[in-house]
Amino acid sequence: MNQTQNHPRTSAPLLGMSKAHFARRKITNIVMLSLTGAATVLAIIPLLWITLYVTIQGSRFLNIEFFTQLPTPVGVPGGGIVNAIVGTGLVVGVACVIAIPVAIIGAFFAADYPNTPLGLAIRFGTDVLSGIPSIVMGIFAYTIIVLPQRRFSAFAAGVALAIIMLPLVLRTTEEMLKLVPRGLREGSLALGASNWKTSVQVLLPAALNGVVTGIMLAIARAAGEAAPMLFTAFGSTGLVTDLNESTATLPHTIYIYAMSPFKDWQEKAWAAALVLIALVLGLNILARALTWWRARQMGLNY
Amino acid sequence: MLETTQSERLGIFTRALSGNTPQETSADTKTKMRVQNLDFYYGNFRAIAGVTMDIPEKSITAIIGSSGCGKSTLLRTFNRMGDLVGHTRVRGSVTLDGENIYDRNVDVVLVRRRIGMVFQRPNPFPKSIFDNVAYGPRLLGVGGKALEQIVEQSLRDAALWDEVKDKLHQSGLALSGGQQQRLCVARTIAVKPEVILMDEPCSALDPIATYKIEELMIQLRNEYTIVIVTHNMQQAARVSGLTAFMNMNPDRAGVLVEFGPTTQIFTNPAKKETEDYITGRFG
Amino acid sequence: MAVATSQFTLKEIKHRLRHGDTIFDALTLIAGSLALLTVLAIGWQLWQESHLTRQAFGWELIFSADWDPYGDKFGALPFIYGTLQTSLLALVIALPLGLGISIFLAELATPWLSRTLGFLVELLAAVPSVIYGLWGVYVFAPTIVKPIGETLNSIAGFIPLFAGSVSPQYSRLAASLILAVMILPTISAVSRDVFQAIPRAQREAALALGATHWEMIWQVLIPYGLSGILGAVILGLGRALGETMAVTMVIGNNYNLTASILEPGSTMSAIIASQFGEASSIDLFRSALIEIGLILFFITLVLNLFARLLVWRVARRVPSEMRV
């Protein structure tokens, strides 16, 4: 019963540590915690640096012509990148048409059967697909469309971007569907609605805001991709009129202009970069604002 | 009628105590911690209002009360665990050996080193049994043979040594719930705190494991000042010398209704509220 | 009779409803499987389209350092080396920073500050790769990378890794540093999630024993979330390995196998990006580049599978600690 007698207590070892030791611990604490803050600040510097620099450099060469004119050859002043802006719009549009329906429909399965082998396989496949480099997607689109058709095309570019967008939209839609309160779904099922009607008429509208946010982020990502364009859209100096033609795109144009040895093209690269970064960061900030707004609507302290 | 009920209650205690007499606090016992006019706020919500109590040294003090009345919150102000949650504020004072632990120049790390805590659910680190117990002493710079001695002694004091001495390098998570909780006690006493706070330490345990922890507490009270929050009245009656009864006031703030020797609180409470609660609980 | 009819119709309705649900389920299953099928299709296509070089050279493509497409010599070793070198260096730089950021955001910053700074760090991942390249080659490399390279060379120039002089625009060091910036958001976001998933009981246990805030983080939280953090690192590595445009623009496309990080080099993705235009009309050359793409696909696939498993394991482990 009395353990203290069985094991006579050695005089309690004194754990009153030395002042120096404690001071060292406190200093380590302060130094290391400050370093984590410093790391965060350090990470944000490139973001600010890039956005400010692109804005300052780009705005010097930006004018109305830049948005409305076709490119001019080296040395000829003026000209714009309307072909690249239209081209980016077109290929991203094609990507949306292909990816969004598939992603949203697929998300229902992943959300409805989250812990079944098939549901897990779908989530796993989606995660893995999102980790594959975009340049590989470009080669893939090249081998299945450009090679058989023997021509570069906006359509092939759209397919490559669709593969990039698919996992992004699928996963956000899945997450959003899972956030819809159970009661809403059960209420609809209890009224005798079938599962698919409930999904399409109740769950999807409830999740729509979040899904739209996910789509915006996916568009921002796709619009900035240059690597797949090298093998698919290929680039062109004219305005694209047909999905089966090659086309210029914004990121690809920036690459070509930036890597050229010509001063006036390099200047245009900065202006095009400003257009692209405004588009991409704008979409990101808008998506975040929507998320914030939605959270406030739901009364969450977000 | 009332007399009968009281003696009946007393009967429950004598049975419950199973040989351990509750420690009676004599007048000359030294006060270890003194809580004065303590208010605790979450943002603008006052969770604790005007608590004043003296906790005597080397004894077990129990805090009882209905759930949500702020017992755990009060306990967590004793080692400044409440600091962890944002937007909290404390008014009044909690002194340890006469020193206010909320004083501006008091280091919270030192406070917590002197006032240890055992939690509601066993929370061993996902490390070996040895490393769990060694964690605190290592922070203090202890190593080598001395560390091994401390680990062994702490495990012995926590009545766990015989069960784990052959598997010190297995994960602490591999133990049963009751063993995990005793491991957490061993981990706490390894730094030789002066006060041990226990926040419903048996609420996740089965009766046998609970019994072992209670037995352990009774032994530890010779060395340590123990404050235990419990929803289990029999437990409070079995182990504690002093009992504090807390309740919610109309503003939903926790207040201390009555504080005194355990036998008195349970058999002859001064306040109607206390009596209602205890009668209700014992049926 | 009436009852029987209504039962019949009810049954029929039920049957038809279930029928609709079956179609819906099948449709969603097909759509959902497309992601996985695409992964398989990518692997299959790259395998097929690289058969020319696989048959002609076998493993030589991986182990030879001789790259002369017009002399039918396709040794990808310099690019494999370049990819590993730049990615690992980027990881070495980004890991402590990313870990620091995630600690700051998850453990120290107030919720408002954490959200705001967290969003800004996430925006780093949103900046298009080609813009990193543009900024890298004209701004970052001349102002930051060149002085760093010169300092490294003057201190440790006797080590082959730091030999040679650094160009103001193109170097492997510039590529590594930009990659580090680009993978920071991945590492910090995943490890922040890992930290936030660690139960409060673990923190309280450490603090109640008199640990300082940092000791709690370093000795309890990091070991607890280690496999999740490893998952974050591998996801970051996967991103660095496949990153194309920024690297292509700053690395300088040198096809020789040299050790130094101060010299220009090339990577697997950079060689594909910079030479595909010329290669597309030459079957063997194109096959070689697609085979390099296949290697890249395979490495990132394996890394991703591994990282996902690790992150999933942490997510599953959290409740087991609560076991009683």
Image (cartoon, rainbow, N blue to C red):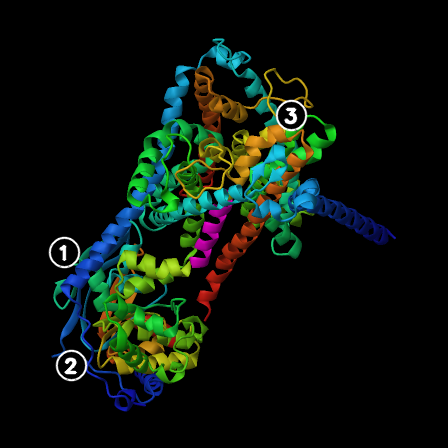
| Mark 3 residue type | Ala
Q: For the point 40% across and 24% down, which residue is it? A: A54
* Residues at marks 1 and 3 touching, judged by CB atoms closer than 8 Å: no
| Mark 1 residue type | Asn
Q: What residue is pinned by disc 2?
A: B26
User: Mark 3 Cα within 10 Å, few/some/many (few <14, many 20+)?
Assistant: many
- Picture coordinates of residue A256 (x, y %)? 52, 23
Compare marks 2 and 1 and give the one earlier in the sequence.
2
Q: What residue is pinned by disc 1?
A: B105
The answer to whether residue C40 is above or below residue A258 is below
The answer to whether residue C73 is above or below residue B229 is above
Q: For the point 58% across and 31% down, which residue is it? A: C275
- Residue placed farthest to the right in the image? C1
* Residues at marks 2 and 3 touching, judged by CB atoms closer than 8 Å: no
Foreground residue among C34 and C66: C66
**Does residue B1 appear to the left or right of C256 in the view shown?**
left
* Magenta highlight range: C226-239
User: Mark 1 Cα within 10 Å, few/some/many (few <14, many 20+)?
Assistant: few
- Picture coordinates of residue C247 (x, y %)? 47, 35
**Does residue B150 appear to the left or right of A87 in the view shown?**
left
The circle drawn on residue A154 is 3
- Quadrant of the image for the N terminus of chain B? bottom left
Q: For the point 14% across and 56% down, which residue is it? A: B105
Q: For the point 42% across and 15% down, which residue is it? A: A61
User: For the stretch drawn in magenta, what is the main secondary structure?
Assistant: helix
* Observer able to see residue C15: yes
- Picture coordinates of residue A104 (x, y %)? 63, 40
Query: What chain is tagged by disc 2?
Result: B
